[in-house]
Amino acid sequence: MKILIKTGRVIDPLNNIDRQMDILIENGLITEVKASIKIVVDKEINAKNLWIVPGLIDVHVHLREPGFEHKETIETGSLSAVKGGFTTICCMPNTKPVIDTAKMVEYINNKADEKQIVNLKVIGSITKKQEGQELSDIEEMHKAGICAISEDGKTVMDIELFEKAMIIAKELNLPIMSHCEDHAIVGKGAMHEGIVAEELGIESIPSLVEDRIISRDVDLARKVGVKLHICHVSTKGGVELARKAKQRNQSVTAEVCPHHFTLTDEEVKAWGTDAKMNPPLRSKEDIEAIIEGLKDGTIDIIATDHAPHTDEEKNVEFSEAPFGIVGLETAWSICMTELLEKGVLSPMQLIEKMSVNPAKLIGADEPRLSVGEKANITIINPNESYRINKDEFVSKSKNTPFHGKEVKGSVIYTIVNGEIKYCYKKAVPKIQ
């Protein structure tokens, strides 16, 4: 199939291109990138006043299958991803059973291949059943195609065991994606430690819970020489620890989620359990530090930590509700509204954090809009304003504190390996 994208603003960080161009796609590959292309094609996309960017990549997604299909499936999560402009996503291992064997990795890959919706990469669990007692067979999972290892939602508290995992990861050139939470002091904490938690009478999670483990993991990774990725940084201290590691030229990357640079713990008053996530929404001071970290490059990656839960699961007492919100379908518009519109990042910088840097982390093909490259492309309308409506989500779950928020920037097309997988306002396949 031939697809011609006409007169769009091509923004391509790796090629240092930001200008109006045409792109021709044939048989899944980019075959021409020129100021003007005139050819008969199967599909022509008028991209006037639109942005054409390398496909977005999310390195932190929970697809829930197998074991929790009532929350999300590989299919619904993948459809949610392409609606959000993502051409590649990485699924976390906290399924049931846990993704801790080559067999489980192959199961996920086969399911994704059957659907052929999005490029799906698998992250393997560091320990068996995520119990923190015995290492998974990381070498066999690597042979089966994992892109990283993580304890996802948990911390490997046994330092010797974690060091062994790091040594193996270094040998295999796999990054370690670290959820930083000190189990010894978190207790039954459910939201950020501060005035709001006191007012609501909710047990809290101090910043120290995160900062202490970031410090530990950075030091351990420095000793071993492994690539360390710090997931969902939420604290001022965490940003500073990542910054100091980078100043030492250590191989450390850091991610942040849209909710952590947008919302404070005050939102718990309005949104209740839909504002409950781990790490929790924190203070204005933490947001300011995260924004500065995005500006100066301390924070390399923006990821969603897409964590679907049903209304029934969330509609309980705050302390009993599961942590997490959905994010695949709101990430781009939140980032454009909060980062581009406010001058925090340039379009080129945002695309680096949502496409180029994530690809580097997981060892994916470099996302270039160049001749010969796979056509993984996101087309965006930067000018459209709308209100986020959770009832229009493709995800099975609707748990979001962004419902009703006025945002700017819509995903118009998502092209995965040369095939249009999402088209704005076109009917989305119904899932049985």
Image: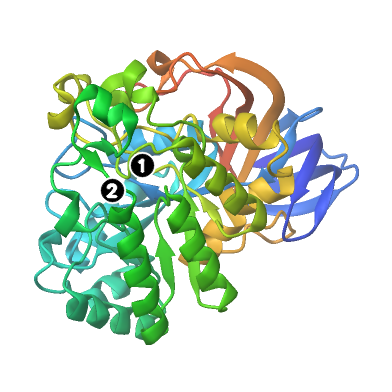
Label 1 packing within 10 angstroms: few (<14), some (14-19), many (20+): few
Which residue is nearer to you in this view: 157 or 403? 157
| Residue 298: percent from left, percent from top | 58, 60
Measured in 3D between alpha carbons, the distance from the residue under mark 2 to the one under mark 1, in whole angstroms, is 7 Å
Furthest-right residue in this view: 35
Residue 146 can be seen in this image: no
Residue 412 can be seen in this image: yes
Residue placed under numbered mark 2 in the picture: 111
Q: Splitting the image into 4 quarters, where does residue 230 fall? A: bottom left
Instruction: Please tell me which residue is depicted at 32% across the width and 71% down the height of the picture.
Output: 216
| Residue 376: percent from left, percent from top | 59, 48
Give the amino acid at mark 2.
Answer: Lys
Q: Are marks 2 and 1 in contact (CB under 8 Å)?
A: yes
Query: Is residue 27 shown above or below 201?
Result: below
Residue placed under numbered mark 1 in the picture: 115
Query: Is residue 188 shown above or below 154?
Result: above
Which residue is nearer to you in this view: 358 or 406? 406
Instruction: Please tell me which residue is depicted at 77% across the width and 60% down the height of the picture.
Output: 15
Quadrant of the drawing holding the C terminus: top left
Tell whether 375 sits left or right of 205.
right
Tell whether 26 sits left or right of 123.
right
Tell me the element at label 2: helix
**How was this image coloured?**
rainbow
Give the amino acid at mark 1.
Answer: Lys
Q: Splitting the image into 4 quarters, where does residue 10 fall? A: top right
Query: Is residue 383 shown above or below 59?
Result: above
Quadrant of the drawing holding the N terminus: top right
| Residue 122: percent from left, percent from top | 33, 58
Q: Which mark is residue 247?
A: none
